[in-house]
């Protein structure tokens, strides 16, 4: 019988403006591979929520990373911070021997992230961006269909990820770090589009090699990050692709990830669509198949659980340091292409 997995000590490192805390705090509470938790919360605004969710598993609350690391040595640090503030904190966690799960983008320049990735690899640690859609049941089924050859050779990829323009009209939003390029690194593409770029590479098992496109503020709101970005891409497997990433709606999301192949297609519409559909000419009687996985868990909780399980069992995580670097490089290459009006190698 295999030895049981060890239980790990996890740290949540954040501050008042840390993103997705309403998802991360309960996700950590529901992760059984975590034995105990510590909270590093500059300003102390999240302590009450953590205490309520984690109960007796909360082993300490600290005001700074330095104070926390004097008293605790986490196996896994979940860093969710303003992008401009994240790199030195991630570095301190890696130096202390922790694996790091970082809320994207975790930097405002590629030059700030690459040394962190190199440090993680040299220390045998994982530095993972929180690209939680990788464990989505629809994504996993889509990857299975593509990698099994069900739709043949991949020809092309279509990506759409659209959110609401409404949030950009609110004065309170204009003051947030997410709406300021110097603090966020970019706008919609680095905040939401990065998820779909990563999924395109994950599902097709290829990388973006060249990219060209445009970005801008089509809605005209008083922010200096892009609310819209479009790009054309060439993948390492020879396929071409496009992405439309923007704030256009009045509310909610629309999304699409579609892979065209020599023997069919597969399409995922998580928002504003039927879920997953596919079609293959390899069948004796080709037809459109609908896949229903709506009741299966998705989102940040299963992703955090998968990361913790990987650390506890010394197994591969849902995405690697290399995957995280590639996703960020693709975004920053798209920004460079838009700024220079040239095709850029990733």
Image (tube, rainbow, N blue to C red):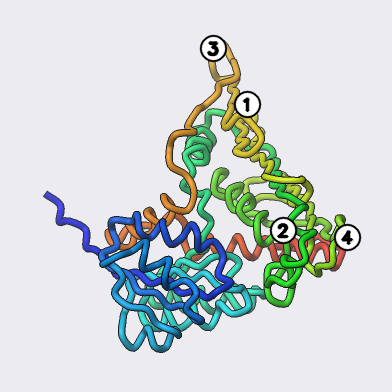
Q: Tell me the residue that label 2 is attached to.
A: 188
Horizontally, residue 230 falls left or right of residue 294, namely right
Please tell me whether residue 183 is drawn above or below residue 140 in the rendered image.
below
Camera-side mark, 4 or 3: 4
Q: Which residue is mark 3?
A: 284
Position of residue 90 measured from the top left corner of the image (x, y, whole percent): 49, 77
Screen quadrant of the C terminus = bottom right
Q: Are the two marked residues, 4 and 2, in contact with CB atoms closer than 8 angstroms?
A: no
Task: Name the residue rendered at 67%, 45% in the picture.
Answer: 252
Lower sequence index among marks 3 and 1: 1
Looking at marks 4 and 2 on the same chain, the residue that comes earlier in the sequence is marked by: 2
Find disc 1 in the rendering and name its residue.
264
**Inter-mark Cα distance, 3 to 1:** 13 Å
- Of labels 3 and 2, earlier in sequence is 2
In the drawing, what numbered circle is on residue 173? none
- Give the mark toward the camera: 1 or 4: 4
Q: Quadrant of residue 104?
A: bottom right
Label 4 sits on a secondary structure element that is loop
């Amino acid at each position: 019988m295999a030895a049981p997995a060890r239980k790990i000590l996890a740290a949540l490192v954040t501050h008042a403006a840390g993103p997705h805390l309403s998802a991360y705090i309960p996700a950590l509470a529901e992760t059984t591979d975590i034995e105990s938790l510590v909270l590093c919360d500059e300003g102390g605004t999240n302590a009450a929520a953590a205490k309520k969710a984690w109960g007796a598993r909360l082993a300490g609350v600290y005001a700074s990373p330095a104070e926390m690391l004097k008293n605790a040595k986490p196996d896994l640090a979940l860093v969710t911070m303003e992008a401009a503030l994240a790199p030195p904190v991630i570095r301190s966690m890696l130096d202390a021997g922790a694996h790091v799960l970082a809320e994207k983008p975790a930097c405002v320049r590629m030059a700030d992230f690459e040394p962190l990735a190199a440090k993680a690899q040299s220390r045998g640690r994982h530095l993972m961006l929180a690209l939680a859609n990788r464990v989505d049941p629809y994504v996993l089924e889509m990857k299975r269909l593509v990698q099994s050859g069900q739709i043949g050779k991949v020809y092309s990829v279509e990506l759409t990820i659209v959110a609401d323009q409404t949030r950009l009209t609110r004065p309170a939003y204009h003051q947030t770090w997410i709406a300021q390029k110097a603090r966020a690194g970019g706008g919609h593409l680095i905040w939401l589009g990065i998820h779909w770029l990563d999924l395109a590479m994950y599902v097709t098992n290829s990388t973006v090699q060249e990219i060209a496109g445009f970005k801008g503020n089509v809605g005209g709101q008083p922010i200096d990050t892009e609310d819209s970005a479009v790009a054309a891409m060439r993948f390492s497997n020879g396929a071409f692709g496009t992405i439309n990433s923007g704030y256009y709606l009045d509310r909610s999301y629309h999304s699409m990830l579609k892979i065209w192949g020599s023997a069919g297609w597969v399409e995922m519409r998580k928002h504003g669509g039927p879920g997953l559909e596919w079609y293959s000419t390899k069948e004796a009687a080709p037809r459109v198949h609908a896949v229903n996985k709506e009741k299966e868990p998705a989102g940040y909780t299963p992703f955090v659980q998968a990361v913790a399980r990987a650390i506890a069992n010394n197994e591969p995580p849902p995405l690697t340091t290399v995957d995280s670097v590639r996703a960020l490089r693709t975004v920053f290459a798209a920004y460079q292409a838009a700024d220079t009006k040239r095709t850029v190698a990733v």
